[in-house]
Amino acid sequence: MSEIDKIHVPVLLDECIELVTGNFANLERKNPVIVDCTLGLAGHSTAFLSSAASATVIGIDRDGQALELASQRVEEAGFADRFIPVHSAFDSLGEILDNRNIAGVDAVFMDLGLSSLQIDETERGFSYSKDSALDMRMDKRQSKTAQTIVDTYSAEELTRIFREYGEEKFSAAIARAIVSGRENGERISSSAQLVKLADEVIPRSRRPAGNPAKRIFQALRIEVNGELNKLASTLPQAALHLNVGGRIVVESYHSLEDKIVKKFMRKGIQADVPAGIPVIPEEAKPFFSDVTRGALKADSDEISDNPRSASVRLRAVELIREIPESKKAEFAKEAAGEKIRPQKLKKSGKLKKPKKHR
Ligand SMILES: C[S@@+](CC[C@H](N)C(=O)[O-])C[C@H]1O[C@@H](n2cnc3c(N)ncnc32)[C@H](O)[C@@H]1O
């Protein structure tokens, strides 16, 4: 193992290798193309390159540091001639492929969230267990940080992101405390201050286990990096660029991500007709097969070796026929970036008035 291999342990590695490269022998194309949308430190990608000797990997990451280390690792493993690193957010997937005249790919892989490298580097500000500036950017070229949000969002906007992205029950009280601190010259400017505020505001009797600031940190991270909207607009781009026989394979680590993946995959797994219709028209027949039959999880051995795997949900679909034209049009719209709002907010159209916290 090189030093880079030790920084981040890939989750469900054997399952991912099988799902991404396992059907390459059945494809007509002799040089399959894999897109790893979340290259990280290339733990998964080097394994794909090793398992599929004729495959090329396009490795995308928005984190320049990860991309550098990943490229070094791929080179050390002797696969540099079959590897194309791309410094970008993955929602530019369509553009990245079009710019390289790549019409179709054979696998699109996503291992969502953060790498251990990002979590462990204190100054990146992702961890609530270490004091640092409120940064949380995956891409350091971006100007919006967690501090920007804490400094400039209104109490309503903060409440919305804490509730939607953190599923935090005391969202409004935390938002009010941040804004009133700002107004009284007690601006929150470090992760330790934010942890202290959450500890003061969330009643001890109403807290789930773990750090009380966990959900607030998750919400800020999702907002800083636009994580859910990027995921929702990338999945249709992946489908639109997939060759028949190709697969989309996604590892998610929290329920908000997994819901988006599941909802998207279901559009092709199920026939697009009302229940009970006797004959399914050709256009409405399923175009994805559910390769994982729902979500795969890590077993207890993997969880004890690598606690990060505890929350993983791995889903994969295979494109079994051309996507019908009507669905292609729907996917093209989604790829252009419709905002994702959780179902309950969509129904009511507005946030419920938060209960006053005493
Ligand atoms: C869990 S790590 C991937 C680890 C990798 N599979 C490995 O084995 O080394 C997730 C990576 O995805 C990147 N990432 C997350 N969201 C992204 C996005 N929207 N666009 C591009 N990269 C993203 C992060 O910067 C991080 O490096």
Image (cartoon, grey):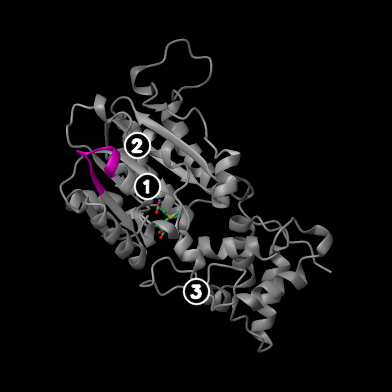
Name which residue lies at 42% across and 65% down: 138
What amino acid type is highlighted by mark number 3?
A: Asp
Labels 1, 3: front one: 1
Residue 44: image tag: 1
Q: Nearer the viewer, residue 105 or 358?
A: 105
x, y percent for residue 221: 52, 64
Labels 1, 2: front one: 1
Q: CA distance from mark 1 to mark 2?
A: 10 Å
Asked if labels 2 and 1 touch by Cβ distance under 8 angstroms, the answer is yes
- In the picture, the quarter occupied by the C terminus is bottom right
Q: What segment carries the magenta color?
A: 49-57
Asked if labels 2 and 3 touch by Cβ distance under 8 angstroms, the answer is no
Q: Nearer the viewer, residue 6 or 55?
A: 6
What amino acid type is highlighted by mark number 1?
A: His
Name which residue lies at 46% across and 22% down: 273
Is disc 2's CB within 8 Å of ligand 1?
A: no
Residue 109, located in which quarter of the rendered image? Answer: top left
Residue wearing tag 3: 135
Name which residue lies at 29% across and 53% down: 59
Left or right: 74 in relation to 131: left
Q: Secondary structure at mark 2?
A: helix
Residue wearing tag 2: 20
What amino acid type is highlighted by mark number 2?
A: Val
Q: CA distance from mark 3 to mark 2?
A: 34 Å
x, y percent for residue 69: 32, 63
Name which residue lies at 48% across and 55% down: 113
Is disc 1's CB within 8 Å of ligand 1?
A: yes
Q: Say few, some or many: other residues with alpha carbon within 10 Å of mark 2 (under 14 / 14 to 19 / 20 or more).
A: many
- Residue 18 drawn above or below residue 78: above
Left or right: 136 in relation to 184: left
